[in-house]
Image (cartoon, coloured by chain):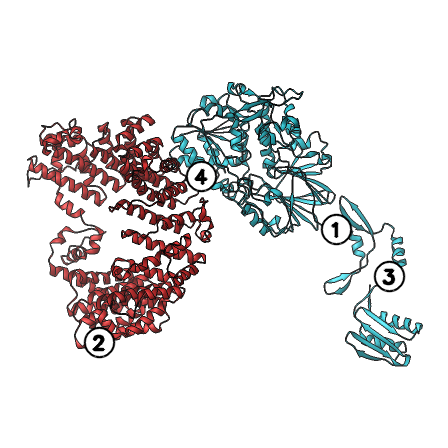
Chain colours: A red, B cyan
Amino acid sequence: MSTTNHGAATLTCPQLLIAQKRFLHQVPHTSSVLDTQVYVFAVRLMGQLVANYDMLQTPEEKYIVTACVQKATEAEKWSEPSIRNAVFTLLRLMLKYKGALDLVIKLDAIHLAFESLSDPSLFVTGSAQKLVTKLIITSVTDHRQSTSEIHKSLIKQLWVVLRSSSDVAKKATVLKIFQDLFHEISNVILEEVNSLDFLQLLNKMIRCDSAVLSREAATLCLVYKRSNPADSSLDLRSEVCNLMHSGHVHVALNLCRQLLLREYQHLADGWPQDFLRQPLIIVCGTFINPLESGQFAAIAKSISKKSACLEVTGICLGGIEQLLQQGKDPCSFAALHTLLQLTSQECQCDVNHSQYRKFLLRQPKIQKAALRCLHQYYQLYLNDETGIGIPDAFVGSAQYLVDSLGCVDLDVTIVSEMLKCLLPAIKLAICHSLLSAEIQMWPEVLDLLGGTLQKRLCDMHWETRDSTVEFVGKICQSCADDTTVNMWIRKHNLHTLSWECVKDGESYVRAGALATVGHLSRDTTIWENMKIVKDISQEDVVHHILTIISTDTEGFARRAAIDLVMRWHKDGNQLQPINDVYRTMVAATKDFDWEVKLGVLTFWGNIIDQVLSNDTLPSYAINLETSKKFKGVVPEEKEFETKVEMLCSIGCCQALLFSVEDYEQSVRKKACELLTALKAKCLDNGLIQANSRSKSSDPLPTCGEINMTTPIFLDSIQRLDLEVLLTENSKSCDSYENNPMDLLDDILASQRQDEEDNAIDCY
Amino acid sequence: MKLYCLSGEPSKPCFILKFKTTTIMLDSGLDMGSLLNFLPVPLVHSSRLSSLKKWKPNDYRGSGKIENELRACGTNVFVDSAPEFTLPQLDILDLSEVDVILLSNSYSTLALPYVTEYSGFKGMIYATEPTLQGGRQLMEELVHYVERMPKGSTANVWKNADILRCLPAPIKDAVNPLAWKQCYSLHDVNSSLAKVQMVGFNEKLTVFGAVTVTASSSGYCIGSCNWSIQSDYEKICYVAASSTLTTHPQPMEHSPLRNSDVMIMSQLTRTPTVNPDAMIGEFCMTTALTLRNGGNVLVPCYPSGVTYDLFECLSVHMDSCGLSQVPMFFISPVADSSLAYSNIFAEWLSQGKKSKVYLPEAPFPHAELVNTGRLKHYPGIHGPFSDEFRSPCVMFTGHPSLRFGDVVHFIELWGKSSGNTIIFTETDFPYLYALAPFQPLLMKAVHCPIDTSLNFGQANKLIRDLKPRHLVISERYSHPPALHPHRNDLVIETDQKTIMYKPGSVLNLPIKRTYERVEIEPELAASLVPTEVKPGVAVAMVAGTLVTKDNKHVLKAPSDPKSKVDGLESGRRYYVWGELDMQEFVSKLAQHGITDVKVEDSAAGHIVHLPSDDTLIQIEEGSTHIICEGNEGLRVRLKDILLQCLSKL
């Protein structure tokens, strides 16, 4: 099905319909012998036709749908989740047609959907939920007498499920349906349901043991409150307090988190924030702005056990992170710092006395959540334009990060989070001129960090080496302009060690190191120093990168090396010997990794752009490094033909022609795009004529076989129907998924061949 | 039962156990801490060391010539003499009385020549084959290092108590230096090890028939074991260096150590605050960092044990860091045999390594590293090594004390460059004091102690699992280490009755011997007529001669059958037993003419009333009373009738 018959593209719509009908007509009749997946495909195809083409509206087509759905609901097929999912989706999509509600009722789909509200498959549950929601909404908007009362009965059924069902999953799904309905038709729901009863029921569910049910009920409370802000019967603050007193601190805090989401901001008045950060304050023993004693005691009691303490602290940290992402300061920096110390084995300070230390010590989830918050804090301070300055505990927190980063048995994911935090911390320090020893401790922190990074660049775990080398690259990228950081990188040999990582045994590290080398090379001081320390020349460096492109076993590393070459090429770095670079890139056209090949083509695209656009550069550009670089390659006054000749001589044209026939579609597409652009320029400059095709029947030259000359290249691009190739190569599996018409083209094409008695004997 | 604790250092144990009629020595560890008080012995002349200032106490007025004995380096004072070792307190008892020596691992064998040679020792020595070979390698290396550059003189004046107290720390804290001994000779090593009998795991060995000793894997190093010493009714376990971590040796066996009367535990980790895994990581990381910066790495090590793991982990890490081309050198007089032996001891290795043999592959990757030339081993720095040597490199060499061996040469060579690193992995010596005579040193020193033996948490868990009735441990394990006084978790905490020992202690172990097994000769056994006294229990009278030979007790039939019969008959005594059948008793009474019998049941048994004779018989379980108003004839008749109704033995 992935192939396309180009002749079919010209077929008319009636022919398509015939093919479609033939295909779909056969489905109900042959359902017993059809493979389940084919049947699923047929139902999904109908859904796509409805969604994209508004088809299946005629009585005859409705008959096909009815027959297909009826067959699908037979026990054997219905047991397959993908069938159930496809049918519910099709019916939901069909509800956009007038009268489709009758069809759904006729098929008894309401009953089936209600049954599937707690389906073992989450996908089926989701599609059933959406179908029921859509049914109610459609019924409300459909004013016909026969169907106008359906929504009332459906809401009643949902209400019955909520009140009396023992199926928790089903109740949770019904709560989700109510959430959607409140968004769309809150008035209708409130007409059908007594709001007081409704809220009482929700309160009951919030207090139940099921976390899912209580979460959904709490969310529904919020939705309700948003829909009915005037309803004084629901005081969210009281609700939260009640939840805490009844031992549901985690639900209460989750409710606070929901309230802090943007859409509920106007309801919040700041109290959810106070509630949310309270666990952090308690575990850290810093009694700032305590809540009323009742709530404080409730939270303290709830976290007296390890699992509850971890859960509640996790929710609290998630909420703080959320607030920080919204640009709000929850005033918890010091507490966060203390919490991080509590989680750290190495910390020997006062936090040892916290009774919660035994719960929180070395808990990776809490550590990571706290580090994410710290990262957000640093970002907040970094982006702060109000000049509030950095907190007192800043250096202490950075010191903690650096100290902890040096621990030998740290989890790799924690190391990664710590490094993520340290990046904005260093930027922050630079912004606030801490590096110039304004704060006495900071240079020591940096020194310690330098030593630790050295070790981490040689860590046992490749993940750590990778994140560290990436960190060095980012530091260099964003802070190398700062003299102190620049000196710090050189003092601690972070540049030379990063270069050594290019030879790492793990491909991800090599790839990361190559990206870092790209950043390092942008700073002349660092780069030149690296070469001096390692006693290597630029040619040696280029040669090593080219060796990676040619011989590295892993695609990641080769891609990264090509990216580096492109970056150097773009930045005007000395890519010497350039002929070796071209030769390697031509060879890389045959790489096994399609992304490498795409990278190579991008490189050639840049070369073409620079070579061909050189004459269009403004006069002042002559002094730019990039234009200087090409002085040796492209003489200023050469004609367009000479430029094409040059492209041929360096192997660019050869590589493009080779890639047009690559086995990877994306590579072919990219090559076609480049060649199309080049061909257009050749046409503009009169090197080839429009509508003149070479009669030569020789095969197209392939990469490496011949020394490509300009005439051969021009002849080749004239012979290639690049437009057709580009159209062909632009199609993907996704396009078939989203646009079944092409697929129908294929089906139709095969039908037509039968009609024309043109079948070829496959034997 | 007595336990003599001869060693002052729990990690270098030496015990003597007197149990039943046997005297068993458990391990023979050599404390080499004393070496650190001596000046290093360089392989080639070191002008720096030879120009160190001579030192003598300011207020010394003694007659002994101390000038040439002590030299100062920085704030430390070192003895310029042939190195000496601290022996176990072997003079506590006569070593000729020792019947058997049980060796647990190769590191606990180093004092063996001092024990077995020139001491009158004539017992047996039991050890596994890897322990024997490993011990031999360690001893040979030690002797080679010491004898290679012999010191002309021996310093003894400084040991005088008057001088010793004037010396600066830490040398002034030396314990009884007068007892220190110089190193044994290769002849002593060979002679001592020739007495070793090799044993396998779980092989039962009888010591004079009195006890059975069995070795079981302890998981610490190749062939390392724990011992269980068992009589018929008592069991003593000796838990030496053990490891529950998964490294190259066969894993530790727990079941042979369970439910002992006494468990003696020694050789717990000396670095309880660090995790060996983390330290291996640190070691590899530091090595890679140094190499990437163009420096050399020096690893003072023993020729076996953790060194194999270091080869394995480091080579993998160097591969992953793109440092495969950097050579690793292993220099030791026994390097060749160490590498070779480790790969032929497959049966003593972990399952993973053992299974490699069937592929077939060498169990340790160092065989492959040697084949590919990445690991090069040499007996010394002279000869072919100098042709192959290139820098940067990783150098594994001994001795970890840094007082002799090739390591001294490399510290002198590389110590002046901050690009080089020395990494300490062995835990026998405090690394700062080991480095003291080489100061000032620019070379980086990194401490990555790797001790895989049990930490306190693991030991406590093991004790809970093994449930010994009594536990014997060093008193050092009862309080936190000096460097971590607040770490109350770094102690042995157990509900078991614990007995602490100090160096030189003699402990009376609380084992009360109650039973002894006796065998009955088959002929005598055949003559017995057992009577079943209750279901499953039969008893019989037996008379015979108890013969004790080789701590085995055998009950034999008396040699003279006549005297046997006479003896039996003359001294014959019947034992009655069983429950009185009242009907039978009444009928017997009737047979003897006593017909007027009334039987009543009482709470405790029966009361038989003979109205015509005015007699009452109270029959209760365990007692019978005949109340017959002084009619002795009737009493005897009644007694005889009653006894007839009971079973007899």
Residue, x 31% and y 48% (percent of image)?
A: A376
Judge depth for marks 1 and 2 and give the one in front. Answer: 2
- Residue type of the residue flagged with mark 3: Arg
Q: Chain of mark 1?
A: B
Judge depth for marks 1 and 3 and give the one in front. Answer: 1
The quarter holding residue A420 reads top left
Judge depth for marks 4 and 1 and give the one in front. Answer: 4
Q: Are labels 3 and 2 assigned to the same chain? A: no
Please report whichever mark, 4 or 1, sits nearer to the chain's N-terminal start. 4
Q: Chain of mark 3?
A: B
Disc 3: which residue:
B573
- Residue type of the residue flagged with mark 4: Gly
**Observer-nearest of A241 and B319:** A241
Measure the alpha-carbon separation of dots 4 and 3: 79 Å
- Residue type of the residue flagged with mark 1: Glu
Please report whichever mark, 4 or 3, sits nearer to the chain's N-terminal start. 4
Q: Chain of mark 4?
A: B
Measure the alpha-carbon separation of dots 4 and 2: 71 Å
**Observer-nearest of B436 and B372:** B436
The quarter holding residue A688 reads top left
The quarter holding residue A218 reads bottom left
**Observer-nearest of B552 and B99:** B99
For disc 2, the neighbor class at 10 Å (few under 14, some 14 to 19, many from 20) is some
Residue B541 seen in render: yes
Q: In the figure, B4 relative to B582: above or below? A: above
Measure the alpha-carbon separation of dots 1 and 2: 96 Å
Disc 1: which residue:
B516
Disc 2: which residue:
A149
Residue B356: image location, x then y, percent: 49, 40
Residue A495: image location, x then y, percent: 32, 32
Measure the alpha-carbon separation of dots 4 and 1: 54 Å
Judge depth for marks 4 and 3 and give the one in front. Answer: 4
